[in-house]
Image: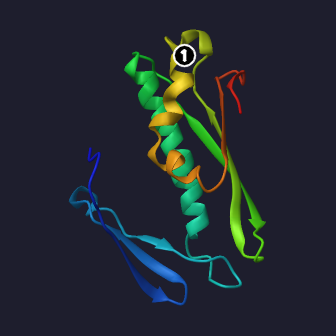
Amino acid sequence: MSTEGNWRIQLDQEENFRFRVQFDNPALAPLAPLITDEMSPLGADAGPNPSRLLATAVANCLAASLIFALQKFKNDPAPVHAEVEVSMVRNEAKRLRIGQMAVDIQIGRQAADMAMLDRVLAQFEEFCVVTQSVRSGFPVSVSVHDADGVLLKGD
């Protein structure tokens, strides 16, 4: 896993606001390119728009960080489910912006089955590159529930 450095993603316009996205990692070459598009009426809803991709990246990064941290202590949290709610707002210039995100993660096991859970919950967010990168622009709240719906962590 690359921890530092530069990488590149190519986007090619197909039509109007629809783009074909190709990733630079040779290991990803067999994957079909990702199609992005703006929502109608601006676009044709042919794929997720950039705001939805950013929300996906935040939730995915947090879920992966939590899984990694739990597995470090020999826990099996599967299946993990994450949802992200995005609040769109207008800034002072009346331009649309992401105002905040709320991510809820549910692990597939009961809290009592997880070793070192308090330690994991206290620090897993710090390892999420995407969330920590966007938090300077807007707040991201995070909650974690166990398989029974018990709130383990909440902002």
Split into 4 quadrants, where in the image is the N terminus?
top left
Residue 66 in picture, x, y percent from top left: 50, 31
From what the image shows, is residue 51 above or below residue 114? below
Judge from the rendering whether residue 55 lies leftward or rightward of residue 13; answer left or right.
Answer: right
**On screen, residue 87 above or below 118:** below
Percent across and percent down for residue 3 are 29, 45
Percent across and percent down for residue 104 are 66, 38
Q: Residues within 10 Å of mark 1 (few under 14, many from 20)?
A: some
- Residue at the spot 61% in from the left edge and 57% down from the top edge: 137
Whether residue 89 sits left or right of residue 9 in the image: it is right
Residue 48 in sight in this render: no
What is the quadrant of residue 69 in the picture?
Answer: top left
Which amino acid type is shown beneath numbered disc 1? Leu
Q: Quadrant of residue 8?
A: bottom left
Residue that badge 1 annotates: 117
Can residue 133 be seen at all in this image of the molecule?
A: yes
Which residue shows up at 29% across the image and 62% down it?
7
| Residue located at (26% from left, 47% from top) | 2
Looking at the rendered image, the quarter that the C terminus falls into is top right
- Work out which residue is located at the far bottom of the displayed protein and give it: 16
Secondary element type, mark 1: helix
Give 30 or 96, whichever is nearer the viewer: 96
x and y percent of residue 84 in the render? Answer: 66, 48
